[in-house]
Image: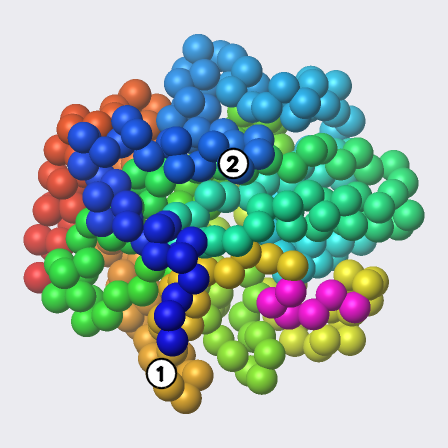
């Protein structure tokens, strides 16, 4: 079956992203995405003590006077919204800050984010009227995504016996949010990872071992990360949290890599031991280095060289 044209276009740069000659031009591909914040720019502004200046004006305006405590939340589809609802049921929140992510393998109509935000805001105003909901925005570091998920595929398969881009993809969300949390003074990061999906489906990047790895990474970066719906399995419970009949898979951008970690029978083909080895031996340490490199202002060929050096050392310990 022919894939959508948008998906084909978005796949093209993935293997090119880490190369210096390309990095100066790829941003033009994403001009259509509203409120897009570069992780590189955020780190540079934070280094000057002016991190809020890197955020969209309407977001920064709200955050400068935002009631505390602030909670930073994943924002994409229904699971992230449900996670925020659970957190607010049991914890004090003054301002909820929803942040999405640019992923180069996603495609579709970005207006779904605005409609999801409006639906979430309206529900929060009814159930938690004292909570301020900041405007949504999107973080991106496509180069870092490429280092974690594209550049070293052959080596990673040799080292760990498998590869899926989904683990590094979600970890790169939390890599960017670790710095963002510090910039805005958020006390917690709320994530919508969910262990079991429709018909008992499991995803490598939402297994218990993956979630534990994300939490350890965030903690090491000084961020408390929570997963309020990770063990929720009932559609009745999800319906109560969402309140509008929102079904799994609806109102979110599709990804061309969806299902890559499963066999033809729909079952997960990667073991928890493999995931643990990959996260501990490659993804988490590389993400940690990438945060530091971005804070140091590394870009282009200099960044590529340092990352190659780090990855060479990490894989030497695995082989």
Q: Is residue 253 left or right of residue 123?
A: left
Magenta span contains residue 249: yes
Q: Secondary structure at mark 2?
A: loop
Mark 2 vs mark 1, CA separation in Å? 35 Å
x then y, percent, for residue 132: 79, 34
In the image, residue 259 above or below residue 6 = below
In the image, residue 231 above or below residue 192 = below
Q: Secondary structure at mark 1?
A: loop
x then y, percent, for residue 3: 39, 66
In the rendered image, the quadrant that contains the C terminus is: bottom left
Residue at screen point 69% across, 33% down: 135
Disc 2, disc 1: CB below 8 Å?
no
x then y, percent, for residue 198: 60, 79
- What colour scheme governs how the chains and residues are painted in the rendered image of this protein? rainbow
Q: Which residues are magenta?
A: 245-250
x then y, percent, for residue 269: 34, 80
From the viewer's side, name the closer residue of 206 and 38. 38
Residue 32: give its label: 2
Q: Which one is earlier in the sequence, the residue at label 2 or at label 1?
A: 2
From the viewer's side, name the closer residue of 28 and 76. 28
Q: How many marks?
A: 2
Residue at screen point 79% across, 68% down: 245
Q: Quadrant of residue 230?
A: bottom right
Residue at screen point 43% across, 48% down: 103
Q: Quadrant of residue 8?
A: bottom left
Residue 263: give its label: 1
From the viewer's side, name the closer residue of 187 and 46. 46
Q: Mark 2, mark 1: which one is toward the viewer?
A: 2
């Amino acid at each position: 079956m022919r894939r959508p044209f948008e998906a084909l276009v978005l796949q093209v740069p993935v293997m090119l992203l880490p190369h210096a000659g390309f990095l100066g031009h790829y941003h033009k591909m994403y001009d259509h995405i509203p409120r897009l914040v570069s992780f590189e720019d955020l780190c540079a502004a934070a280094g000057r003590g002016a991190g809020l200046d890197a955020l969209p004006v309407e977001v920064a305006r709200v955050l400068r006077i935002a009631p505390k405590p602030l909670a930073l939340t994943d924002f994409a589809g229904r699971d992230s919204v449900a996670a925020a609802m659970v957190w607010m049921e049991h914890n004090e929140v003054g301002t909820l800050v929803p942040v999405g992510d640019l992923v180069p393998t996603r495609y579709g109509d970005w207006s779904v984010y605005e409609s999801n935000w409006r639906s979430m805001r309206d529900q929060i105003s009814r159930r938690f009227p004292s909570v301020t909901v900041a405007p949504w925005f999107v973080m991106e570091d496509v180069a870092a995504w490429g280092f974690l998920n594209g550049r070293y595929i052959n080596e990673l398969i040799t080292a760990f016996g498998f590869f899926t881009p989904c683990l590094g993809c979600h970890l790169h969300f939390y890599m960017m949010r670790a710095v963002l949390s510090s910039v805005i003074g958020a006390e917690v990061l709320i994530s919508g990872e969910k262990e079991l999906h429709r018909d008992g489906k499991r995803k490598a990047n939402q297994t218990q071992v993956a979630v534990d790895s994300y939490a350890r990474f965030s903690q090491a970066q000084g961020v408390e990360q929570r997963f309020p719906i990770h063990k929720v399995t009932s559609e009745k419970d999800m319906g109560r949290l969402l309140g509008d009949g929102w079904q799994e898979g609806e109102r979110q951008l599709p990804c061309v890599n969806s299902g890559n970690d499963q066999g033809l029978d729909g079952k997960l083909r990667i073991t928890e031991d493999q995931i643990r080895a990959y996260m501990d031996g490659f993804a988490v340490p590389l993400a940690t280095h990438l945060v530091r490199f971005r804070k140091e202002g590394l870009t282009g060929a200099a960044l590529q060289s340092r990352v190659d050096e780090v990855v060479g050392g990490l894989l030497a310990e695995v082989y």
